[in-house]
Amino acid sequence: MLAVALAEARKGHDEGGVPIGAVLAVDGRVAGSGRNRRVQEGSVIRHGETDALERAGRLRADAYRRATMYTTLSPCDMCAGAMLLYGIPRVVVGEHRTFLGAEDLLRARGVEVVVVDDEECRALMARFIDERPDVWHEDIGEP
């Protein structure tokens, strides 16, 4: 599943966007996959995780309780909040060295957080941050 999220991240980078991909898996199957589309769509909320949730469509509450969110980068406060709202019990993070998001919040609320520390996820983000620091800072809400 992380490979699918990474493929989404690469697509996002190729489109000129922030290279973060995500997959919402329910019972081991892809329910929705997505990528950060803030640049592509002029969106303020279309991060990888929220895009994966949107693309999964409406699901029954019990489906979220059996889900895992796979994301190439540590989830920000907004994306962590969406996971908490829907009761997603597990998140697999590709890497958190380029950006450490709300992992402690998720853990404090009982979410299992697994950090893979994938070198390809890290290299893709590091390259993007070097290439487009202005877009990166906008994405994470920093001046």
Image: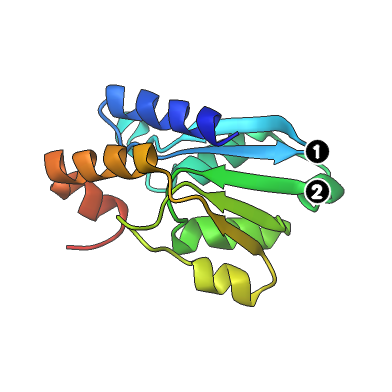
Whole-percent x, y for residue 26 in the image: 76, 39
Residue type at the position of mark 1: Asp
Residue type at the position of mark 2: Arg
Tag 2 secondary structure: loop
* Residue positioned 41% across, 38% down in the render: 36
Whole-percent x, y for residue 93 in the image: 51, 51
Q: Which mark is residue 27?
A: 1
| Quadrant of res 32 | top right
Q: Which mark is residue 85?
A: none
- Asked whether 107 or 137 is in front, the reply is 107
| Quadrant (top left, top right, bottom left, bottom right) of the N terminus | top right
Are discs 1 and 2 less than 8 Å apart at CB?
yes
* Residue positioned 20% across, 39% down in the render: 127
| Quadrant of res 4 | top right
Q: Is residue 82 above or below residue 29?
A: below
Q: In the picture provided, is 96 more to the left or to the right than 133?
A: right
* Residue positioned 70% across, 32% down in the render: 31
Tag 1 secondary structure: loop
* Residue positioned 38% across, 40% down in the render: 121
Q: Which residue is mark 2?
A: 66
Q: In the picture provided, is 126 more to the left or to the right than 46?
A: left
Whole-percent x, y for residue 27 in the image: 80, 38
Q: Is residue 34 above or below residue 129?
A: above
